[in-house]
Image (spheres, rainbow, N blue to C red):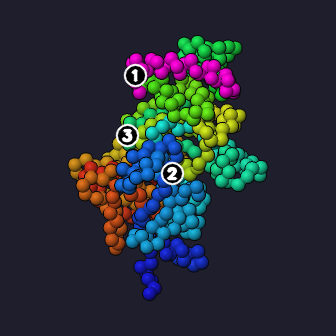
Amino acid sequence: MEKGPQDTLISLILRSMTLKLPLKSRPYPLKGGIQYYAWGDKGAIPKLLGISNEAQKPHAEFWMGAHPDLPSTLLDVDNSLAIPLDQAMGSAPEPLLGEQVMQRFGATLPFLFKVLSAAQPLSIQVHPTKEQAELGFAREQNSMPPMDVSERLFRDKNHKPEIIAALSPFYGLCGFRPWSEIRDRFLSIPQWAPLLDGIQETPQSTQELYRRVMELDSHQRQKTLEPLLRDLHNRHQKVAFERNDPSYWLLKASASLSTSDPFDRGLFSFYMLHLICLEPGQAMFVRAGVLHAYLEGTGMELMANSNNVLRGGLTTKTMDVEALLAHLDVQAPQTQLIQPTPGSLKEPWSRFVTPAREFELQCLMTTDQSLSLDQSTTGPEIWFAAKIGNTPSKLMVQEASALVMQQGEAFFIPAKTQVRVEVAPETTIYRALVPDT
């Protein structure tokens, strides 16, 4: 039987590949994908999503978006049909993205939304600027093997500014410390002090020293790092380092390294970069060119739609030191902690404001009271239910049945959608959207 005016969004998208049909503006369930990287925590994401993990696999990231490496799936309200979100964007971009977003970013979702959960330190890394990504991608397209080959540095043509908002206490490294602090730390370690020889105090001092440690060969790294690691281990056995001490994380990172390379060059970064601790609700913004690493914890991560990473250690993956150094920007603001701008009675969403053009992260929290509000989207949005109390929340549009929001569920809301939200007590919803300017 033909559904006629009751056609669902997914069936309309599939038919719109050959027929230009109007698509309905309403929220739709979104099925994300999981990345099982070795550094991932085994419990946090499964608990958040309400899924089992009998195999005890590390659940590192839960992706919500249209990146071709792991596109989410757009579902019908009854789950009868499904289509990858990137294909949906390609088939019916304007109803999903809106004219304004298409004019600015083309027929693609400009952001990628994730839950990230780390039990072990991630690689030390930096992300390219937009111009650098376009040049690097074009160069590798012409000179290197296909996209699935691990030697590639540029997976796409986009930059990757990013923000992470903590769901649990969250630790990371971000941006170089002032030169005086780095110099004094190196001088305090007998095997490290010679690395400063000949380096004058100039705006380039930090980059010059970082190049020097990154270019040490394996024998030099062992000679420089082994005595320090032995000393730190002995001290930690007597009086344990606190988690606000970079020595704690240096030892933890060292313990997680492959036995084939126990003196990884990334270990130097623990005494060169700022150690950051975010409490739940706090956030950190990372610009292009800023060296960083996430160490432990769970958070909501939002970024431009890219998977470009240039690594600087704590990894067995491809690492190109010259490329890494070429993309560092030690003059950029090295740390940017973000406190959310509180909401109001009229607009209760708290905003994490950043310079990014592609995305904005917002959060809505209720305590012991419920909340009803009407929302109108101008561009595409993804909502994620990070916490739901005893009563589920609901998303409703006129002349349509309500969508129930359970903890761990995500929803895609197309552009120009009017939706009423019934937010139950003890609820936390995170929202990814494209800012107007």
What separation in Å lies between label 2 and label 1 (alpha carbons)?
33 Å
Mark 2 or 3, nearer chain start = 2
Above or below, 309 relative to 398: above
Q: Residue at x 32, y 67 (%)?
A: 402
Left or right: 403 in relation to 158: left
The residue that mark 2 highlights is 35
What residue type is disc 2 on? Gln
Q: Which residues are magenta?
A: 215-243
- Farthest residue toward the left? 368
| Residue 240, label in figure | 1
Q: Residue 78 appears in which quarter of the rendering?
A: bottom left
Is-magenta flag for residue 240? yes
Left or right for 370, reference 139: left
Q: Earlier in the sequence, mark 1 or mark 3?
A: 3
State the separation of the CA atoms marked 2 and 3: 20 Å
Q: Position of residue 264 (x, y in %)?
A: 60, 30
Q: On the rendered image, what quadrant is the N terminus found in?
A: bottom left
Mark 2 or 1, closer to the camera = 1
In percent of width and height, residue 426 lies at 27, 50
- Which residue is labeled 3 in the image? 168
Amino acid type of the residue that numbered disc 3 sits on in the rendered structure: Ser
Residue reaching furthest to the right? 143
Which one is earlier in the sequence, the residue at label 2 or at label 1?
Answer: 2
Looking at numbered disc 1 in the image, what kind of residue is underneath it? Ala
Q: Is residue 423 magenta?
A: no
Left or right, 388 with respect to 303, comes to: left
The one of 411 and 232 positioned closer to us in this rendering: 232
**Side of 8 relative to 321 (left or right):** left
61 relative to 88, above or below: above
